[in-house]
Amino acid sequence: MKKFLLSGIAAALLTTSLPAMANFVAGQDYQVLANPVKIEKPGKIEVREFFWYGCGHCYTLEPHMQDWLKKLPKDVRFVRTPAAMNPLWEQAARAYYVSEALGVRQKAHLQLFHDIHAKQQPILEQAQLAKFYTRYGISEAKFNSTYKSFPISSKIAQAKNLAAAYQLTGVPAVTVNGKYVVQGDNAKVVQVVNYLIDQERKAK
């Protein structure tokens, strides 16, 4: 994990070097949705990250998001949504929800990203993913039965509906309070997200 950890440190340095009070422009730094998406828990500002484990840009963005999460404000709710916008992406999305359902998501999330991108291991399809999660005490049989279960399929349907509602054409994409979409893979993304969070606070 050395490269990943180092990139996280670099992310923190880059984030703090950008202007704290920058003004960002709609249509340039972020997109405003014509039809806002209903958020799950009104009363908190929702930030939702759409990603795919096989996406190099998502891997590059992740250290910035991890650094941002360490300072998550109390009035902000963060949700991570694996994109299931095609059959290949859906396999990794199902694996994410399986890891969540079986209680190993926090242990496995960054490691899977690392193995795919830093180690160049092809862990993107069901059989490969099932083998990956055995290191966390989940048998391939348990993984595969959970992978095909109704609760996981329901979450996949929800992820697809959300991606459509946000009019996403790719990832990574970070949404703010159902109104804005921020795309990119660098420290600027979290700066724009923080700016939009502040705008939402002022609008209350």
Image (spheres, grey):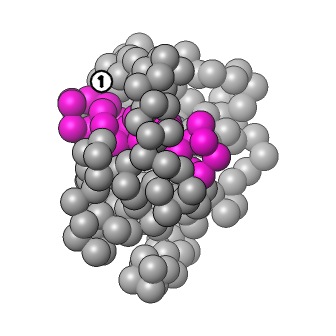
Residue 11, placed above or below residue 203 = below
Note whether residue 102 is visible. Answer: yes
Residue drawn at (23%, 70%) of the image: 120
Q: Which residues are magenta?
A: 83-105
* Residue 93 lies in the magenta-colored region: yes
Residue designated by label 1: 167
Residue drawn at (39%, 83%) of the image: 3
* Residue 57 lies in the magenta-colored region: no
**In the foreground, 91 or 60:** 91
- Please indicate whether residue 202 sits to the left or right of residue 51 in the image: right
Please identify the quadrant where the N terminus is shown: bottom left
- Near mark 1 (Cα within 10 A), the count class, few <14, some 14-19 or many ≥20, is few
Residue 49, placed above or below residue 192 = above
Residue 14, placed above or below residue 170 = below
Amino acid found under the numbered disc labelled 1: Gln
Please identify the quadrant where the C terminus is shown: top right
Residue 62, position in %: x, y?
A: 44, 61
Residue 36, position in %: x, y?
A: 47, 18
**In the foreground, 121 or 135:** 135
Residue 2 quadrant: bottom left
Residue 66, placed above or below residue 9 = above
